[in-house]
Image (cartoon, rainbow, N blue to C red):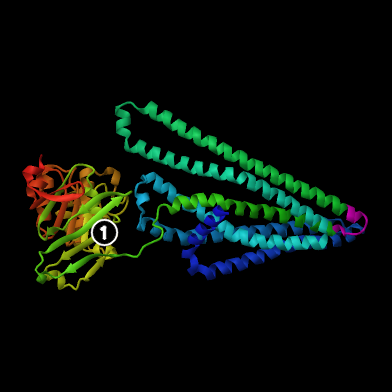
């Protein structure tokens, strides 16, 4: 019951963004119900035609039996075809409407747990949403419509013959019980197959990323053995799921056969003693078959809630639950108050799993100065950059951006939340990536809706990447071929992306680690000439020599050091 409640809760959350499409869904349901009425009428039409044709057959007009029953079968086929088309239309509409919403939920706000997953695992979990949406669509359309259809047919069977109706209900109950018995195992196997698929995708990604090491160290045989083990394990689980599904189909066919035999036996007996017209027996056969077929489909949909919950939970872990409103992050202060222009951190504390990673005392990053942060690996330098940008949840955070008169004249807000802060603070994150196949200008502007080519070109010049771009066919409008870029070219494009924002505060996390000294020196000189607050995480000597101040991060705290002391 708990699993069912959780599954229904997940379905409810998936459907929340679709409230605006209520009218369209209602219209589709109405059309689907009309199709079901047509399908329900076909067995009754069968009775009328067969009874009429039987009377004509006594006068030698047997052709009408073939023609009439063929018309019945054609009617049923057309009804089923229309029904399938409507079901597919609903599924396509649901997926088209929900996927953009889901994209915003997942990639607009990663949860901390999601950030710890590798790329392949994130992709696999997002793809689980497709399975979840299809399950929701099937339950929504086939579940609701088919349940009405089954209830109506069962009522019609009771009117025709209560014994046949009881036998049909018993057969459905047996199948439903069998489906529940094996459902738990089917759910477990489905979860294991989803995990195996994610492992295979991750393995292939690692194979591509590490192909040089694999080739150089002759590790191909070992990697192939590991791959074979992954494939074999998945095939074993797939075979187990196939066996379970085959068992269910056997039970389904046995139940259909049993109810058909009972219907024919009882119907033939009633026809023989004159209690039932011949056409009514044909109608009974059609009704019982249609009811059981739809009932088994309905049972599958209800039982699939457990499987659906597996995929929904995998997807749900990617996003924040519940979503939180954007909090005040930075205050904009007037320099007339006597404060030094720049970024003032009054309080910043970050903790993971109960362990304090950062606990900063008040520190000032002056406007127009370059402050370099150094420290051992794992001390939290990257976490500090992400905390300042608002991308890492903080136990406590209080910052002020002290503006210059030119800033306050532009009418900036007095308090900034994360989104407003991102307009005035730019960052080049360590390990960030470019968008493959996207025009270079769009990569630099990072999907700015009001893309300014002058700012794009200026950012490229400051990042020393302009010469590389203009040599390309198409220049700034050429698609970005990420795989063909050197690491240094990619880094300079990412620096240009940060500079495009013309920020008040610029954060650089190992932004030039792949560049030669000459290019790195040119970028440092350009950045210092901007006259903004620059905070750089770096270890290379050129940054430290060029710094106006050097801070060492150790044990979660910052302290000022001299360049000579930093080299120790």
Camera-side residue: 153 or 89? 153
Q: Residues within 10 Å of mark 1 (few under 14, many from 20)?
A: few
Residue 456: tell me if it is visible: no
Q: Picture coordinates of residue 357 (x, y %)? A: 25, 49
Figure quadrant of residue 335: bottom left
Relative to residue 264, is residue 105 drawn left or right?
left
Q: Is residue 314 covered in magenta?
A: no
* Residue 228 visible somewhere in the drawing: yes
Q: Residue at x 33, y 48 (%)?
A: 353
Q: Is residue 233 left or right of residue 362?
A: right
The one of 217 and 136 positioned closer to us in this rendering: 136
Q: Which is nearer the eye, 97 or 486?
A: 97
* As drawn, 182 above or below 416: above
The quarter of the image holding the C terminus is top left
Instruction: Find residue 557 and report its horizontal and vertical position in percent.
Output: 18, 50
- Stretch in magenta: 269-278
Residue farthest to the front? 354
* Secondary element type, mark 1: strand
Is residue 275 inside the magenta stretch? Answer: yes
Q: Residue 40 in the image: x percent, y percent?
A: 72, 62
Q: Is residue 125 above or below residue 43?
A: above
Q: How many marks?
A: 1
Which residue is tagged 1?
396
Q: Residue at x 14, y 70 (%)?
A: 334
> Residue at 76% of width from left, 57% of height from top?
287
Residue 293 % position (x, y): 69, 53
Where the N terminus falls, by quadrant?
Answer: bottom right
Residue positioned 68% across, 59% down in the render: 78
């Amino acid at each position: 019951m708990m699993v069912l409640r959780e599954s229904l809760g997940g379905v409810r959350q998936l459907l929340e963004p679709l409230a605006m499409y209520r009218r369209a869904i209602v219209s589709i349901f109405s059309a689907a119900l009309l199709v079901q009425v047509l399908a329900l009428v076909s067995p009754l039409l069968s009775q009328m035609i067969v009874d009429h044709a039987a009377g004509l057959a006594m006068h030698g007009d047997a052709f009408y039996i073939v023609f009439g029953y063929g018309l019945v079968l054609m009617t049923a086929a057309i009804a089923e075809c229309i029904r399938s088309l409507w079901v597919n239309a609903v599924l396509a509409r649901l997926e088209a409407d929900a996927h953009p919403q889901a994209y915003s939920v997942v990639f607009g706000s990663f949860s901390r747990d999601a950030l710890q997953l590798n790329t392949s695992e994130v992709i696999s979990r997002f793809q689980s949403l497709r399975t979840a949406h299809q399950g929701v669509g099937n339950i929504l359309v086939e579940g609701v419509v088919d349940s009405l259809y089954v209830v109506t047919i069962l009522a019609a069977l009771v009117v025709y013959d209560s014994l046949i109706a009881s036998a049909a209900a018993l057969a459905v109950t047996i199948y439903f019980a069998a489906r529940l018995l094996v459902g738990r195992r089917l759910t477990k196997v489905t979860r294991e197959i989803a995990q195996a698929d994610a492992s295979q995708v991750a393995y292939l990604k690692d194979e591509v990323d590490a192909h040089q090491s694999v080739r150089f160290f002759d590790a191909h045989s070992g990697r192939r053995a590991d791959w074979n083990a992954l494939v074999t394990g998945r095939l074993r689980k797939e075979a187990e799921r196939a066996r379970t599904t085959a068992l269910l189909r056997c039970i389904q066919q046995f139940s259909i056969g049993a109810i058909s035999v009972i219907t024919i036996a009882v119907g033939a007996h009633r026809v023989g003693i004159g209690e039932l017209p011949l056409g009514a027996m044909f109608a009974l056969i059609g009704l019982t078959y249609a009811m059981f077929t739809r009932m088994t489909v309905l049972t599958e949909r209800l039982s699939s809630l457990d499987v659906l919950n597996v995929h929904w939970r995998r997807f749900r872990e990617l996003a924040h639950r519940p979503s939180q409103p954007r909090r005040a992050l930075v205050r904009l202060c007037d320099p007339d108050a006597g404060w030094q222009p720049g970024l003032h951190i009054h309080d910043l504390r970050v903790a993971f799993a109960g362990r304090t990673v950062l606990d900063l005392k008040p520190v000032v990053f002056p406007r127009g100065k370059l402050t370099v942060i150094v420290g051992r690996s794992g001390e939290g330098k990257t976490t500090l950059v992400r905390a300042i940008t608002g991308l890492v949840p903080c136990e406590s955070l209080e910052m002020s951006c002290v503006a210059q008169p030119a800033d306050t004249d532009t009418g900036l807000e007095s308090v900034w939340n994360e989104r407003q802060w991102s307009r005035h603070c730019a960052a080049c994150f360590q390990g960030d990536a470019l968008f493959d196949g996207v025009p270079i200008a769009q990569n630099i502007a990072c999907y700015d809706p009001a893309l300014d080519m002058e700012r794009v070109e200026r950012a490229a010049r400051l990042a020393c990447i302009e010469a590389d771009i203009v040599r390309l066919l198409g220049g700034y409008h050429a698609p970005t071929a990420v795989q063909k870029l050197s690491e240094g070219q990619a880094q300079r494009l990412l620096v240009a992306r940060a500079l495009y924002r013309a920020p008040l505060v610029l954060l650089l996390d190992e932004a030039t680690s792949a560049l030669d000294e000459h290019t790195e020196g040119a970028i440092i000189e350009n950045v210092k000439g901007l006259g903004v607050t620059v905070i750089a995480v770096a270890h290379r000597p050129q940054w430290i020599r060029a710094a106006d101040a050097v801070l060492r991060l150790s044990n979660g705290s910052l302290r000022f050091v001299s360049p000579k002391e930093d080299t120790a």
